[in-house]
Amino acid sequence: MASALRAAILGHIRVPVSQTLTLNGSKLSLFGAVRSMSSHGDDHLTKEEVIDRVLDVVKSFPKVDPSKVSPDVHFQKDLGLDSLDNVEIVFALEEEFKLEIPDKEADKIDSCPLAIEYIYKHPMAG
């Protein structure tokens, strides 16, 4: 009985929705302040784009012979880079893709395949 009465009352109540909110005398637009985020929207990079850009970053590193760079190259084993060079490449990748790679993850990125995979799966890579 109570649930039927509740449903009947709620069916007749109309709550006006305003597009603006007044707060301390200032009017704020509710709909203009909403920002939609998508992790894999239309602007997400394709794997090919990520591969091309990662390879460009590695090829442009001063200590690297560009002819030795491929999608499956290891920074230390194949290119002869040291751990500091590895950190610098990861930093360059962060700048290129406008993202921040946590230190714990950055320490694991020691090759092009790992860099490509991490960046491709990162929702904010741009």
Image (spheres, helix red, strand yellow):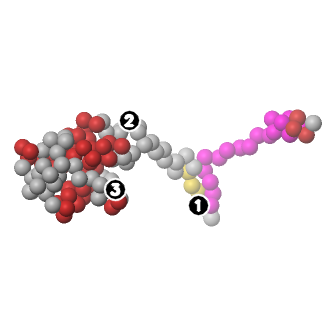
- Secondary element at image label 1: strand
- Secondary element at image label 2: loop
Numbered mark located on residue 42 in the image = 2
| Residue 22, horizontal then vertical, whole percent | 63, 57
- Of the two numbered discs 2 and 3 in the rendering, the one whose residue sits closer to the viewer: 3
Q: CA distance from mark 2 to mark 3?
A: 26 Å
- Secondary element at image label 3: helix
Numbered mark located on residue 26 in the image = 1
Quarter of the image for residue 26 reads bottom right
Q: Residues within 10 Å of mark 3 (few under 14, many from 20)?
A: few
Numbered mark located on residue 105 in the image = 3
- Residue at position x 27%, y 53% in the image: 109
- Residue at position x 35%, y 39% in the image: 44
Q: Give left or right: position of 26 versus 58.
A: right
Question: Which quadrant: the N terminus?
Answer: top right
Numbered circles on residues, count: 3
Q: Residues within 10 Å of mark 2 (few under 14, many from 20)?
A: few
- Tell me the amino acid under the disc marked 3: Glu
